[in-house]
Image (cartoon, rainbow, N blue to C red):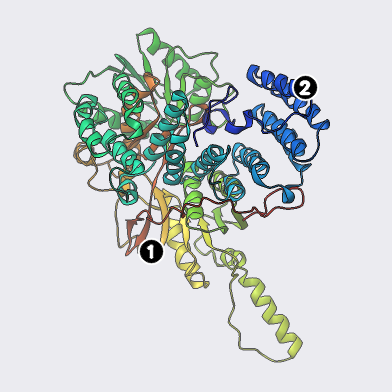
Amino acid sequence: MPVKKCPTILWKTVAATLLIALLAGCSSSVKPGSSADSRLQQQARTLETSGNYQGAAQLYLDAAAKSSGTDQQALKLQAAASLIRGEDYASANRLLDELPAARLSGEIKQHYVVNRAAIAVVEQRPGQALTLLGAVPSGGPYVADYRRLRAEAYLQESRFYLSARERVLLDPLLIDPELRLENEFAIWEALNRLTDAELQTLRTGVPPDPLSGWMELVELTRLYLQQPDALTEVIPHWQQRYPRHPASTAFIPKLMESMRMAGQPPEHLALLLPLKGKLANAAGAIRDGILAAYYDTPAASNKPELQIYDSGTTPEDAVAAYQQAIAAGAEFVIGPLRKESVQALASQPQLAVPLLALNQVEDPTRFNPSLYQFGLAPEDEAREVARLAWREGFTRTIALLPNTEWGERVYAAFAAEWELLGGITLEAERYDATKTDHGKIISSVLNLDSSKARQQQLTRHLGRQLVFEPRRRQDVDFVFLIASSRQARLIRPQLRFYRASSLPVYTTSKVYSGTPDASKDADMNGIIFCDMPWTLESGGNWEHLQHTINASWPTNASRYRRLYALGIDAYRLTPYLSSNMFGAYHGVTGNLSLGSQGHISRTLRCAKFSNGLPVLLEPAVATEPPEQTTVIPVETTDNGHPVPR
């Protein structure tokens, strides 16, 4: 059923605002028992409209105190919804705890579930949200809430196809044109997070299926990303295949307008890189990647004037170089590379022109809307591995990491993402990266030492020698390994030796040089890792750039392969960031999207070593659960919290 527009709805993405809009929360099903009750509820709705959610919640509670039964429950749920919109999640949870969750039914139960799930999504607990939501109601005022919350939860789990599918089903429920357009951009951005192979594999519907139409539209926009006029010519053919597709009404005209605006690069572009010191070679590869992309731009396109500045060896040098570039007329700046230099610029009161930093700082002292942060952070890969393992259905892991600052940093990113998804890390062991024999550590984390201790205890107790086969722990689904390629080649065979050959091993791109070498990497067979398309895919529309780089810089092409890719994407992102029209971009370093604090995050491709070579993991077609239209009761504890799945 169509959903009416509510004045209190804030249709923003969770990543941008951490605020969930509750569509049906603005229309109470309570029948006031008196004119006083009616006035309280009307006053509460007025306060909601003005943004005074705490005040509105109190008025709903005042009305609830004068009511009983389901009316009282409905008013308390309205109060909880107001508290959620006011970002007071602790108070909302306490209020929801007062309700007898197991005895609620009908729309009251649905509103309760929506409130609980909204908090779970805002607090980045997507698994719990999906457990709560269960199936979508077949009708009633909360269908749209279920759809949107499920879409947000799937997005947090990086299940982009399912997130888009939920929003496609949500779209016809939205009457307000602005809300529908925002939802359609969310569909497009979610599908843009899929790889080309995933789009092709998962597009199982045929015209005029709406979801299939969206997926084909994404493929077209990628193909003609830098040629919006050519896209204009092919859109009518797409519309013939998908007549009356919802994207045709407002989305496509807005998208075309955005692409034309985003396709215009700045006239003057500055590049800040350390041209001397220990980072000079790495910076040179990034510079050459930028230049390769610069000269690859079609002749008909407007190329910016490009000026390169030395960002020096200190944060002060980088700030001075930025100011020098501005004084010379730069309209957009790429760089610097050093983390300390990025921190120094992030700490500036303001940035005169947009800056695309080539490193990331986790907690800049202040948010600057002109600062974008883009790098090849291993933390991104660790989080991607966590999401991949979760999508595979795994829930329990053990971790092996080097006793280094880098190892701890990567592990912390993985562990945090894994916990958010609902996964459990049973144990984490540190190994000495300077050694070659890790048997003691591996035996310990697999509980083989405990198994041997039990055998010795039984031998002493029985007074005779037993025939004994040590048995590793059976409560683990996979191993998360943090290692260099050298250490991975040592550890993988040792895991096999210690009876863990059947355990999947997941890791980051640190294990792979980027150049196939079957003889050297044979010991890593079975290891699964995530990396950028530039190193894993062949035949992409960037293959000619790889040939150019290999021919132009044969000495460095292999060693700095990923840094060339970073430079290419940094340059190609510039027109979209400078025009403030960036949503999602299919790059050579991954599918790129803009997150909080200006961080550009990457969705990567994943592969598995087979016969010493990385083989891409194909997307699974059966990722879509059967669509259900009846409410499945949610198993809860006594205070109404969902039992973890």
Q: Which mark is residue 217?
A: none
Name the amino acid type tagged 2.
Answer: Ser
Percent of width and height locating residue 53: 69, 23
Q: Mark 2 and mark 1: span between their CA atoms? A: 74 Å
Q: Is residue 556 above or below residue 225?
A: below
Q: Which mark is residue 525?
A: 1
Of labels 2 and 1, the one closer to you: 2
Q: Position of residue 426 (x, y in %)?
A: 63, 59
> Amino acid under label 1?
Asn
Relative placement, left or right, of 312 versus 618 is right
Residue at 69% across, 81% down: 456
Secondary structure type for disc 1:
loop
> Mark 2 and 1 residues: CB-CB less than 8 Å, in contact?
no
In primary-sequence order, the first of circles 2 and 1 is: 2
Residue drawn at point x = 23 percent, y = 29 percent: 231
The residue to which callout 2 is attached is 35
User: Which x, y percent locates residue 531?
Assistant: 38, 47
In this view, 465 is above or below 434 = below
Pick the residue in front: 8 or 68: 68
In the image shown, does 170 or 368 lie closer to the viewer?
A: 170
